[in-house]
């Protein structure tokens, strides 16, 4: 374990404004020198990404938060093990993926755990969203849309879901996903393709809802505004 | 082109990984096949939906992370400053063996110039040879031992001013040194773990205490005295100093981590966010 004593050596630390301009790899190099503020900036950048990844894998907010925090703690404690032969995002998502896999494996060994999936034997049953013809005024709101998408991802098998989320949401390249998962490149490619096909089949009923596109555009606009605010 | 192949190519094309010749073939297929065009649009929508509905962590995520991190660091610092007696026993055994070997070597070196090959311990009258080779201590008989000292568990050399030569084979693993003083008294040294001292010194030392047991035979009888030698080499002392400095650094880090923890707890309390147990 990295010695805490390394932290108390006096180091010239950069201010928050300077840290925001640095790349992830430059930040982790400063963490290796003992700069805690550099780590705070990495937390700010990755806490959302890691939490969304772990939540979509384990579907329990408490566990997802624990996994995301454990990932960041391990990244801090073992920062000296990072080498710039891979991107920092690849390295940290490798840690997250390993923790998630361990947790999923532990859950499988506990057969008495209840499943919230009403159709545990069939992951291909499409979602059953409310029928817009029954109440035309009813629109799919953001939170409901989020939970429907989350339900759809939960029905993708775990071995497909990891490369799928890393590609679709985290936008890691195929080679990076190969490094994170340890799979062959061809396997990564085929699993992403299969996951996309399955996801599309699951959300197809949603896509018939006319209000969906409007809600999607509203959510995207809000995200763009938040991104601009963060940059400022 | 069949739609099944086209759809696998669509997946690669969305990631910008489809080779140019296949891109041309796929474009031509999509111009003719409405189902595959719809498939491509549905994949794009799925991508947008995943990005737009990304779940966000709770507002106090980073605070709880900092608390957990400080706790982890504190536990790590505490584990690194555990007293020696709680460290890996295997390491202690290694140090013990190394210390004993160092002590035995030092005893040999100190008396090397006066070392007499294993010729023969002289028996005390009345003490059979077999009792000398069984490695057990025997309470001092004639001449006695100084009060308060314990005899080491080894085969002591026993000499008398008036000696009778006997051919007793000394233990091979017990180096011995003999010294004959000018006054005719003879001093014998035998390196061995000193009983009672081993336990006391193992808690803090990097090497075991090695007892040197001196037995001096004089005209008036046999006198024995235990001389304790720590068995610490210069390297051991350097190691002790280095570890003490590291211990001090870790203690300072622990204090700093505790201070940070108190500050974060105060901030958490003042924010009105209910605490969460980990």
Image (cartoon, coloured by chain):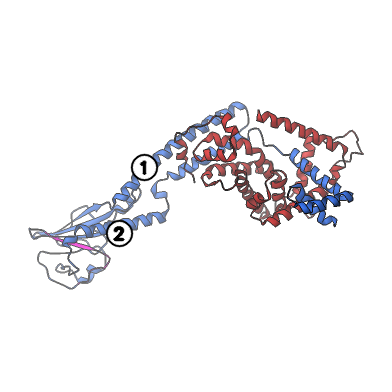
Pick the front one: A129 or B229: A129
* Front residue (pair A26, B151): A26
Q: Colour of chain A?
A: red
Residue hosting label 1:
B244
**Cβ atoms at labels 1 and 2 below 8 Å apart:** no
Which chain is disc 1 placed on?
B
Point out residue A54 in the picture as x, y percentages from the top left corner: 67, 44
Q: Position of residue A88 (x, y in %)?
A: 60, 44
The magenta stretch spans which residues? Answer: B168-180
Look at the image and tell me in which quarter the C terminus of chain A lies. top right
Magenta span has A43?
A: no
Colour representing chain B: blue
The lab-note entry on whether marks 1 and 2 share a chain reads yes
Which chain's residue wears label 2? Answer: B
Q: Is residue B169 magenta?
A: yes
Q: List the residue tagged with mark 2.
A: B101
């Amino acid at each position: 374990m990295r010695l805490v004593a390394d932290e108390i050596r006096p180091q010239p630390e950069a201010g928050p404004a300077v840290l925001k301009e640095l790349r992830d790899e430059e930040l982790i190099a400063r963490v290796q020198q003992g700069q805690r503020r550099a780590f705070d900036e990495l937390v700010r950048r990755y806490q959302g990404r890691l939490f969304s990844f772990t939540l979509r894998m384990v579907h329990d907010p408490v566990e997802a938060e624990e996994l995301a925090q454990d990932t960041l703690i391990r990244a801090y404690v073992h920062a000296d093990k990072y080498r710039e032969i891979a991107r920092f995002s690849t390295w940290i998502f490798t840690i997250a993926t390993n923790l998630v896999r361990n947790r999923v494996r532990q859950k499988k060994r506990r057969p008495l755990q209840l499943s919230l999936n009403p159709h545990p034997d069939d992951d291909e049953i499409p979602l059953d969203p409310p029928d817009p013809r029954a109440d035309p005024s009813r629109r799919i709101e953001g939170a409901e849309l989020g939970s429907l998408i989350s339900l759809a991802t939960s029905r993708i098998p775990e071995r497909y879901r990891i490369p799928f989320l890393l590609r679709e949401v985290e936008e890691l390249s195929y080679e990076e996903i190969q490094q994170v998962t340890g799979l062959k490149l061809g396997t990564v490619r085929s699993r992403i393709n299969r996951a996309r096909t399955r996801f599309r089949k699951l959300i197809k009923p949603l896509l018939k809802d006319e209000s969906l596109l409007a809600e999607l555009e509203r959510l995207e606009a809000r995200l763009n505004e938040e991104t601009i605010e963060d940059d400022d | 082109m069949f739609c099944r192949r086209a759809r696998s190519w669509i997946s690669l094309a969305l990631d910008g990984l489809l080779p140019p010749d296949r891109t041309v073939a796929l474009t031509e297929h999509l111009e003719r096949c409405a189902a595959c065009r719809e498939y491509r649009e549905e994949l794009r929508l799925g991508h947008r939906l995943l990005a737009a509905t990304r779940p966000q962590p709770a507002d106090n995520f980073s605070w709880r992370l900092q608390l957990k991190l400080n706790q982890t660091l504190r536990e790590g610092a505490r584990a690194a400053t555990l007293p020696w007696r709680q460290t890996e026993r295997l390491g202690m055994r290694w140090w013990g063996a190394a210390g004993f070997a160092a002590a035995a070597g030092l005893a040999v070196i100190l008396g090397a110039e006066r070392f007499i090959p294993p010729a023969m311990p002289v028996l005390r009258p009345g003490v059979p040879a077999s009792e000398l080779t069984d490695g057990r201590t025997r309470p001092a008989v004639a001449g006695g031992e100084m009060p308060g000292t314990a005899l080491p568990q080894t085969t002591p050399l026993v000499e008398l001013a008036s000696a009778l030569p006997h051919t007793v084979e000394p233990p091979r693993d017990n180096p011995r040194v003999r010294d004959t003083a000018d006054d005719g008294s003879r001093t014998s040294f035998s390196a061995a773990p000193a009983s009672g001292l081993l336990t006391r010194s193992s808690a803090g030392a990097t090497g075991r205490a090695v007892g040197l047991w001196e037995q001096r035979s004089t005209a008036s009888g046999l006198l024995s005295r235990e001389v304790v030698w720590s068995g610490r080499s210069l390297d051991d002392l350097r190691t002790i100093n280095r570890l003490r400095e590291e211990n001090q650094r870790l203690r300072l880090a622990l204090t700093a981590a505790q201070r940070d923890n108190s500050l974060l707890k105060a901030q958490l309390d003042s924010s009105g966010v209910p605490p969460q147990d980990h």
